[in-house]
Amino acid sequence: MAVESDILQSFLVDNPAVEFIRFQWVDYSGVVMARVLTKSFVLSLDQNGQKLSTPSPILTACLVDGSLLIDEIHSGIDQMWPDWSSIRVNSYHPNTASVMCFVEEGEQEEGKAFRRCPRSRLRDVSLAAKAKHNIDLLVGMEIEFFIIEEVNGIVAPVKTVPHVYSTASLRNNYIPILEEIVRAFQQAGIKVRQFHSEGDSGCYEISTEPLPPLQSADALYFCHETIRGICAQHGLRATMFPKPFEKHSIVGSHYHLSISKKDKEDSFLAGMLASWRGLAAFYQPNYDSNSRLRPGERVTWGVENKTASIRKIRSGHWELRGPDATANTYLALMAIITAGLTAVESGKELKMKNATKIMFAAPLGDKEAEEMGIVDHQPRTLKEAVESLNADEVLKEAIGPEVIETYINLKTKEEAKMSQMVPSERRTLAMALF
């Protein structure tokens, strides 16, 4: 407590212009939630050793469209535990800072108050990797997004040259905005490697340096909000939704995951692959996440193969190409790391062969897949993904019922609700949130 309080006090001394602090968390539908507190109230809570109280269950009460799961609501309160090590000034709104919170659920059984908290679970699995296996984990992010504008009620990407990497796509009025965004990341202590066009009008990618999983997820959400905030200041919008436009590119959110124990990499990879189909419920959790999939796409891995589900870059370093920005990144990383560590613990053997074929034009055939030890297709729908998660007994046991049962219940109801909407309604909703 004293250390946390010291971090807050030091931050406020260094940033005297801050008047408001956003207490943020990410719920099970993947939506970033916030309450904006005055500095005086934050200091009062800190001085009295109190936490911010909210209605329960704040993590699991809403579907992605904001509708309440009435059966899940009960009396009681949850409490927000700010992790002051995550506090950052919002440079696009410099009198405001944001901090990510752990959520303590007041109505859970004794000893389980944090078991459904996504941040707590990601922190815990990262600590377990170190304590049990001496494995250090790092995660780097590729942040893809469209800059968009609304003209006469029509939402469309801003006009730029639609070309991958071309300098022509940098000759426009939006590059100064991208540079402003990158500067904001770096001013907040988030190191950036590069940015470039992504092959479509108004579509760009910013790549960040790797961080430990919890810090990387925190940084990702800060980056998302910064991109949206700065674009809004310029009269524009930004979206990371996987398929915001019918006739334009798809948008991903690739994770670069690395482990320090190279002698465990094959087992870790085998664990991810064995559960990759069920894990899709976490890393592609939106009704329309499957719009990024190619016909007949299978669960594969390949050395420097960008058409594989998991691209191996070097020993112990993979690019996970499935995730998109509708995921609760804390839950997705927790589940993926859990799958890998479970396989490390059991000494699971990597039997699937390296996929060298480039699969843009066509998927692997049945015979070729069988010879390579490839058994699963990517789920084609959210319903398939949730059913696959429910069928993965190894992963379910490793994660535990507190998260699994709640998540499957929420996503099952969300899928049913979203299926009643037409695609344009779902896109409008998702582009506002993601």
Image: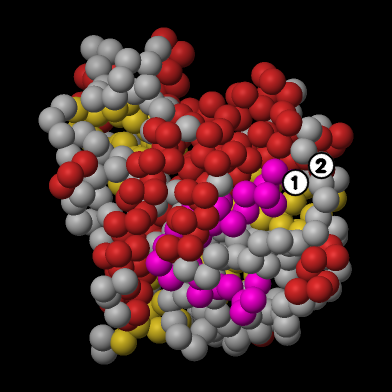
> Does the image show residue 369?
yes
Quadrant where the N terminus lies? top left
| Residue in the picture at 68% in, 79% down | 164
Query: Residue 361 sits in which quadrant?
Result: bottom right
Instruction: Classify mark 2: helix, strand or loop.
Output: loop
Magenta range: 269-297
- Residue highlighted by disc 2: 349
Name the residue type under label 2.
Glu
Name the residue type under label 1.
Ala
215 or 131, nearer to the observer:
131
Q: Residue 120 in the image: x percent, y percent?
A: 46, 29
Instruction: Classify mark 1: helix, strand or loop.
Output: helix
Quadrant where the C terminus lies? bottom left
Q: Residue 91 in the image: x percent, y percent?
A: 42, 49
Q: Residues within 10 Å of mark 1 (few under 14, many from 20)?
A: many
Secondary structure predominantly adopted by residues drawn in magenta: helix
> Does the image show residue 184?
no
Q: Residue 135 in the image: x percent, y percent?
A: 73, 28
* Residue 348 horizontal side relative to residue 66, left or right: right
* Label number found at residue 270: 1
| Residue in the picture at 71% in, 61% down | 375
Q: Is residue 304 magenta?
A: no
| Residue in the picture at 36% in, 54% down | 411
Image vertical order of residue 33 relative to residue 215, above or below: below
* Residue 117 horizontal side relative to residue 201, left or right: left
* Label number found at residue 136: none
Sequence-wise, the earlier of marks 2 and 1 is: 1
| Residue in the picture at 26% in, 73% down | 420
Image vertical order of residue 426 relative to residue 187, above or below: below
Q: Is residue 291 magenta?
A: yes
Image vertical order of residue 207 relative to residue 94, above or below: below
* Residue 37 horizontal side relative to residue 386, left or right: left
